[in-house]
Image: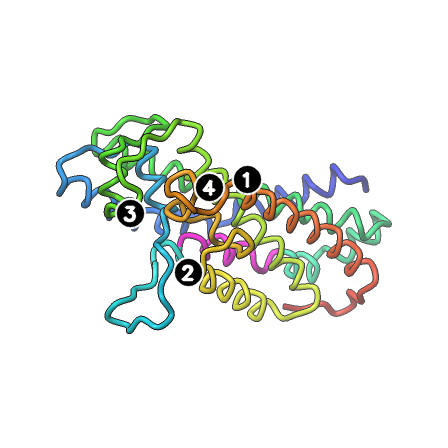
Amino acid sequence: MNLSKLIRHDLRCGLLRPRCLLVPLFAALPCWLCHKIAATAGFSCGWGGYMMYCFMGIEPINILDTVEKSQLPILWLVLISGCLYLNLDYLLNDLSLTGQQIIVRSGDRRKWFISKCVWNLLSCGVYFLIVGATAAVFTLLTGGDLSLTCDPAALNILTQGTAGAVPLSPAAVLALSVLLPYLTVSALSLLQMTLCLVLKPILCFLLSEIILLVSVYWTSPLILGNGAMGIRSGLLISKGVDPWIAAGECVIIILLCAVFGTWEFKRSSIIGAKE
């Protein structure tokens, strides 16, 4: 069995699963809050504004602050973690069902794991397509426009004055609301899947959550999570996270996970593999 057939198998069995129906719920909450903020301020939010708000994140929380002074970005955490949760178990589930037979037929474990990496990246892409579609529905229902624009005054309100009235090009809106969050989530998802080869899935998911929580408290392009927070980006604020560094780190992690995972899976025992 060649690589293309393995990929088709993974896309057919793992790409559109019933649990994808949860994704609009994850995206609807921040979109609804964005609409409430826009309605209160008297402006109409477009698709770019909704997407920007979904992946806006928050300014770094001072670890010494009390609970009253600090508040975790729950909606952002849910939206990012949702993709990680949906992708968590497919590799081990497939391995425990038909995966071992497919590996024998393909004669190459490396192809099997590479196929899972391709599936993972495409699954994250589908997740973002559904989030974007949910934002588009809110845009149409609230009279906004389906464009990659975000009015500077609206952006200033959505960020609570943190970013100021910064004019953003459509390319910058796309980078902050889609490309960088997608790369960040993909890197975390592949890291999680690779760790599942040596750790229990629940531990891998908890490690991913710890990384996200660390990113809430510290701003650094080297900490995964910062790239998916528009409010931390150098495109919005001075001394912010360089988007190129954040994107480059994600690509490097994706490649390292593919290489290490292929090597680890080739040498590991798959007999009786379970979650």
Q: CA distance from mark 4 to mark 1?
A: 20 Å
Contact between marks 3 and 4 (CB within 8 A): the answer is no
Mark 2 to mark 3 CA distance (whole Å):
16 Å
Occupied quadrant, residue 88: bottom right
Does label 3 or label 4 sit earlier along the sequence? 4
* 143 relative position to 195: left or right: left
Q: Amino acid at mark 3?
A: Thr
- Residue assigned mark 2: 216
Residue 190 — which label?
none
Write down the residue under mark 4.
128
Q: In the rendered structure, which amino acid carries the disc numbered 2?
A: Val
* Disc marking residue 244: 1
Q: Quadrant of residue 118?
A: top right
Q: Which residues are magenta?
A: 79-90
The tag earlier along the polypeptide, 2 or 3, is 3
Q: Which residue is mark 3?
A: 162
Describe the element under mark 2 as helix, strand or loop. helix
User: Mark 3 and mark 1 in contact (Cβ < 8 Å)?
Assistant: no
Image quarter of the C terminus: bottom right
Residue 254: horizontal and vertical position, in percent? 65, 48
Amino acid carrying mark 1 in the image: Trp
Which one is in front, 107 or 136? 136
Q: Secondary structure at mark 1?
A: helix
Crowd around label 1: few <14 · some 14–19 · many ≥20 (10 Å) = few
Q: Nearer the viewer, mark 4 or mark 1?
A: 1
Q: Tell me which amino acid carries mark 4.
A: Phe
What is the x, y in percent for residue 21? 42, 48
Q: What residue do we see at 48% from left, 48% from top?
A: 227
Distance, label 2 to label 1, CA atoms, is 20 Å
Nearer to us: label 2 or label 4 = 2
